[in-house]
């Protein structure tokens, strides 16, 4: 009986650790973040910036 309980606990811990590793996601910037950064760096002019924001729905 004790052996079954230990096996169940071990399986539970295994799946918890495994799901934590696969659940890690990297943060990707949104399209608006990219547009804002490009404008801040001077890569695009004001007209292009406003047009891109409009296209994105902002």
Image: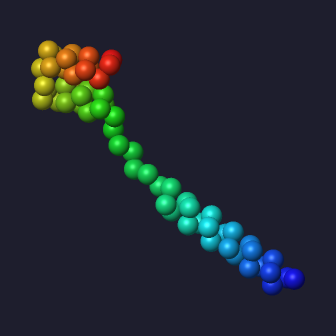
Quadrant in the rendering for residue 5:
bottom right
In this picture the colour scheme is: rainbow
In the rendering, at what x and y percent does residue 17 appear? 59, 66
The residue at 15%/20% (across/down) is 48
Q: Is residue 24 left or right of residue 52?
A: right
Q: In the rendering, at what x and y percent does residue 43 appear?
A: 12, 29
User: Number of labelled discs?
Assistant: 0
Q: Is residue 16 above or below residue 32?
A: below
- Quadrant of the image containing the C terminus: top left
Q: Is residue 15 left or right of residue 28?
A: right
Q: Nearer the viewer, residue 4 or 46?
A: 4
38 to 3, vertically: above or below: above
Give the residue at the far right of this rendering.
1
Is 26 placed above or below 32 here?
below
Q: From the image, which quarter does the N terminus lie in?
A: bottom right
Q: Residue at x 39, y 45 (%)?
A: 27
Determine the residue positioned at 69% across, 69% down.
Answer: 12
- In the figure, is residue 41 to the left or right of 20? left
Residue 3: quadrant of the picture = bottom right
**x, y percentage for residue 21?**
51, 62
Q: Quadrant of residue 47?
A: top left
Q: Where residue 7 sits: x, y (%)?
A: 74, 79
- The residue drawn where x is 30% and y is 28% is 32
């Amino acid at each position: 009986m004790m052996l079954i309980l230990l096996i169940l606990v071990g399986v539970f811990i295994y799946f918890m650790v495994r799901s934590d590793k696969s659940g890690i996601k990297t943060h990707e910037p949104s399209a608006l973040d990219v547009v804002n950064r490009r404008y801040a760096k001077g890569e695009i002019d004001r007209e292009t910036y406003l047009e891109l924001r409009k296209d994105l729905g902002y």
